[in-house]
C-alpha cells in the first residue's frame, strides 16, 4: 500500500529531499526523522523507503545535496573576484549559506571515513577544492593549502556556531567582528 500511495500522490526523491531540507532548515537536522517527514508529506513512513534507504540514506542524500549547494554558493562568490577579495567573498558566502540554510549547513558537517563512501567523500572534497582556489592563488601549495583550509573552516564554523547560539552578547557589531576575523585570517596567510 505504501508504494501505491506514494505513486498516487506523486512522491519522488526530489519531493522527499525538498521536504527534508525545509524541515532541517526550519527545525535543525536532528528534527529530520522518517516519521516527521512522512507526516509532512502525508504518507506513511514505509512509503519513503521507495526513495531513500532509511534514515541513514536520507541523511546521506541531504549531505550530498548540501555539499553541492555549498559548493555552488562558494563558486558563485568567487566568480569575478581575485586575490584577497576572493577570500573575503568566500568567507561571507560561507556564513550567508549557513544562515540561509542552517539544516543543510549542519549536513555539511557529516564526518566521512576515507573509503567509506567515495561519492560523499568526493562531494565534500569538491567543496574543499573550491575553498582552496583563492589560497592557491595566494601562492600556497601542498599541505599548506590543507592547513589553511582547515584553519579557515574552523574559524568560520566556530563563528557561525557561536553566532547561531547567541554567544556574542556584547554590543559591538557582530558583522564587524566577522570582517575583522576574516582580515586576521588573511593577514595570517601572509606569514
Image (tube, helix red, strand yellow):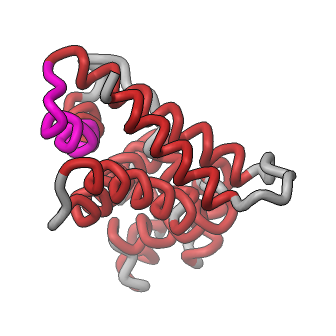
- Magenta stretch prevailing secondary structure: helix
**Residue 46, magenta (yes or no):** no
Residue 85 seen in this snapshot: yes
Instruction: Tell me where residue 174 appears, x and y as whole percent.
Output: 68, 58
Relative to 140, is 189 on the left or the right? Answer: right
Horizontal arrangement in the rendering, residue 139 relative to residue 114 (left or right): left
Residue sitting at x 55%, y 48%: 180
Question: How many circles with numbers are drawn on the protein?
Answer: 0
Q: Is residue 169 above or below residue 39?
A: above
Residue at x 35%, y 78% (from the top left corner): 7
Quadrant for the C terminus in the image: top left
Asked whether residue 119 is in view, the answer is no
Nearest the viewer among 180 and 40 is 180
Q: Which residues are magenta?
A: 126-141
Query: Which percent across, then down, holds residue 149?
Result: 34, 30
Residue 183 percent coordinates (x, y): 46, 44
Whether residue 81 sits left or right of residue 174 in the image: it is left
Find out whether residue 131 is within the magenta segment. yes
In front of the other: 89 or 61: 89
Q: Nearer the viewer, residue 102 or 2?
A: 102
Against 147, is 49 above or below?
below
| Depicted 6 relative to depicted 186: above or below | below
Amino acid at each position: 500500500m505504501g508504494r501505491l500511495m506514494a505513486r498516487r500522490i506523486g512522491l519522488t526523491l526530489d519531493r522527499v529531499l525538498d521536504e527534508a531540507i525545509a524541515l532541517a532548515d526550519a527545525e535543525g537536522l536532528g528534527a529530520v526523522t522518517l516519521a516527521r517527514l512522512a507526516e509532512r508529506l502525508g504518507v506513511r513512513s514505509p512509503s519513503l523507503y521507495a526513495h531513500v534507504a532509511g534514515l541513514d540514506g536520507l541523511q546521506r542524500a541531504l549531505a550530498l545535496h548540501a555539499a553541492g549547494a555549498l559548493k555552488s554558493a562558494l563558486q558563485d562568490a568567487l566568480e569575478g573576484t581575485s586575490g584577497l577579495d576572493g577570500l573575503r567573498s568566500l568567507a561571507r558566502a560561507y556564513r550567508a549559506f549557513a544562515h540561509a540554510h542552517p539544516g543543510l549547513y549542519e549536513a555539511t558537517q557529516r564526518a566521512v571515513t576515507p573509503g567509506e563512501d567515495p561519492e560523499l567523500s568526493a562531494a565534500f572534497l569538491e567543496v574543499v577544492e573550491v575553498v582552496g582556489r583563492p589560497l592557491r592563488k595566494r601562492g600556497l601549495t601542498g599541505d599548506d593549502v590543507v592547513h589553511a583550509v582547515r584553519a579557515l573552516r574552523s574559524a568560520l564554523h566556530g563563528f557561525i556556531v557561536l553566532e547561531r547560539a547567541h554567544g556574542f552578547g556584547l554590543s559591538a557589531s557582530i558583522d564587524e567582528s566577522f570582517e575583522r576575523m576574516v582580515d586576521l585570517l588573511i593577514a595570517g596567510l601572509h606569514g
